[in-house]
Amino acid sequence: MTKQQFLKYCLDAYGTSPDYPFEDLLETAVLRHAGNRKWYAIVMRVSRRKFGFDSDEVIDVVNLKQPTEMFGSFGAVDGVYPAYHMNKLHWISVLLPDAPQDVVTFLTNASFESTRSKMKSRRTT
């Protein structure tokens, strides 16, 4: 999946367009919920070397938040790694050129759901 395909998926599925909050990193795109402004994805250009490859090729990577019960379900075979430059207990990195499209969309959906506003339950007594 390319960065453009990923951004189109997010627009079609959630109605979100990227914003570019880092003036010095114009290629870094953040995707947020409209209501709570929480990030559910950040797309960056990162060297494969950061993920243990013997290559300086720079690729598009998306960091996604995951529920803790999902950790360990995916791995390098799926193009999924511990998060680059984010909390590794809650975020993963997905190498867009390496991950199957169904894995990318599944993990993006999980990230979107895990970061959306939760309805506060009312106690009735």
Image (spheres, rainbow, N blue to C red):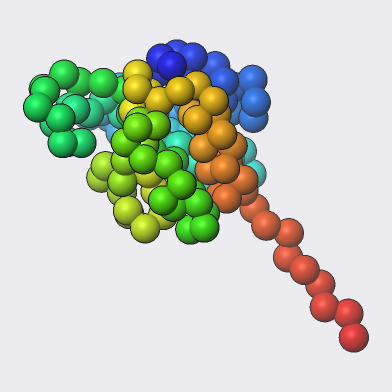
| Residue 119 is at least partly visible in this image | yes
Q: Looking at the image, which is closer to me, 118 or 61?
A: 61
Q: Where, by quadrant of the figure, is residue 105 drawn?
A: top right
Number of numbered discs: 0
Tell me if 5 is positioned left or right of 119 in this view: left
Q: Looking at the image, which is closer to me, 20 or 119?
A: 119
Please state, as top left, top right, bottom left or bottom right, where the N terminus lies in the image: top left
Q: Residue at x 32, y 54 (%)?
A: 87
Q: Where, by quadrant of the figure, is residue 121 drawn?
A: bottom right
Tell me if 114 is positioned left or right of 60 in this view: right
Q: Residue at x 20, y 20 (%)?
A: 58
Q: Residue at x 41, y 51 (%)?
A: 72
Is 90 located above or below residue 32 in the figure? Answer: below
Q: Position of residue 78 (x, y in %)?
A: 39, 32
* Identity of the residue furthest to the right in this view: 125
Q: Residue at x 20, y 36 (%)?
A: 51
Is 38 located above or below residue 124 in the figure? Answer: above
Q: Position of residue 81 (x, y in %)?
A: 32, 40
Is 116 located above or below residue 69 in the figure? Answer: above
Q: Looking at the image, which is closer to me, 40 or 54?
A: 54
Q: Looking at the image, which is closer to me, 63 or 116?
A: 63
Please state, as top left, top right, bottom left or bottom right, where the C terminus lies in the image: bottom right
Q: Position of residue 90 (x, y in %)?
A: 41, 54
* Identity of the residue furthest to the front in this view: 77
Q: Position of residue 22 (x, y in %)?
A: 30, 33
